[in-house]
Amino acid sequence: MSSIWKEEIEMPRFPCLDSDKTVDTLIIGGGMAGLLCGHFLNAENKEYMILEKDRICGGTTGNTTAKISRFPGLVYSNLIKKSGEDHARRFLQANEQACKVYHEMCSKIDCDYSLEDNYIYSLEERGKARIAAEVEAVKSLGGYAVYTEQTELPFEITAAIKTVNQACFHPLKFAKKIAKNQKIYEESFVKHIKKQNDRKGYEVIVNSGSNLLGKHINEYKVMADRVIVCTHYPVFNLHGMYFVKLYQHRSYVLALEADTYNFPKAMYVGEKHEELSLRRYKNYLLLGGCGGKTGSSSGGFERLRKKAREAFPYAKEVGSWAAQDCMSLDQIPYIGHYSPKTEDLFVASGFNKWGMTGSMMAALTLTGQMSDELSEVFRPDRKMINKQFFLNVLSADKAMLTPTTPRCRHLGCALKWNEEEQSWDCPCHGSRYKKDGKILNNPTQNEL
């Protein structure tokens, strides 16, 4: 089944690119980040266009749990330790600005927006110290947070950080509204991009339209002064080193329903990625979790279903879907110049499972709505050599040296068969393919 959002909303259709174009700003990717960038540019009557290889919001945006929060996990205590209080405060302020803009926009859009309490919980005894440290960190930065050991969850926790006035919404109702009147081309696949030698900007080669075999049949050229890449995972390998600065994490979601339901009212998320995430939508409970690094054997729907039966034995499953997220090295997204050598090429990625808030921060940054002081926090070329960096490198080396087939068409890593989801998954960078070789998830741009 597709997500509950996709079941409820039919997104508008947009034409394929049908001629060569010249534009000030080209946005590649029609998910939430791309649409928000377009929305702000459109509001200022700027010349821009969005190219989407398939349908808008058909990927991660359509599979999100759609939480909006200033507190993306236990991040602020770590940021203070590693980068200092000023850096952590600016990240908090950027999140606050994103949440504020969502609040203002959603007050004018019918998208089931609501303010909720949010809890980040731990299941471990030693997690108490981590929760307490995060509470103190948030307070030191001027935020509001409360330490508690009591929640409405149907399983025991050791501690949780409670924050108020976080939010959730229907992502596709929101996206459908802001997409209206935007300059969008669907089924328009960016095949190649190159810097212009004799002028500012880039030449972008686009394959447009599909025949019955799903192959693009027309090729056009777009000349753009600025290019913003909002393709979930950055798909151009020549710059930025994103193939070692990112890894992808897969997670699973169940929609639960009960005749006389007693689901938790607040939003919840575990401190660790494999733990459960909860939010209400109408009379449904969206239960997420039991994920793992794409291409690994950890996680899956059956593990999540087992946990659902244990926690909510009175509920029945009415939907299930999976999501895939790009994870940065330091819990902060990459938003800004694609690399130091690409003056007019920009990127937004690495939202670390908080894609709705991350998309807004990206759009505010890349369209000049956020101050330079706050935007500086997201610089993709910041120093981030840490344990995860070396794990990413080792994982890629191992998969590249594994003498098995098939091989990923991205950078040649050995693929692993995912029996539960019937897909070929890349443990290096997270590309996924159907059994017949068709693409499920990028960064790959070529079928098997």
Image (cartoon, rainbow, N blue to C red):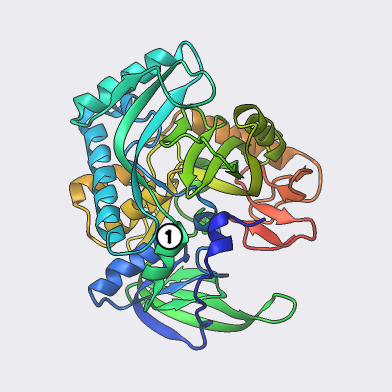
Amino acid on which disc 1 is placed: Met
| Element on which disc 1 rests | helix
Location of the N terminus by quadrant is bottom right
Is the residue 430 above or below the residue 224 in the image?
Answer: above
For label 1, count other residues whose C-alpha is less than 10 Å away and answer few (under 14), some (14-19) or many (20+).
many
- The percent position of residue 420, horizontal first and vertical second, equals 76, 43
Q: Furthest residue to the front?
A: 260
- The percent position of residue 368, horizontal first and vertical second, equals 23, 60
Q: Furthest residue to the top?
A: 125
Depth order, front residue of 1/114:
114
Depth order, front residue of 28/339:
28
Is the residue 382 above or below the residue 298 in the image?
Answer: below
Mark 1 = which residue? 32
Residue 336 visible (yes or no): no
Location of the C terminus by quadrant is bottom right
- The percent position of residue 287, horizontal first and vertical second, equals 56, 39
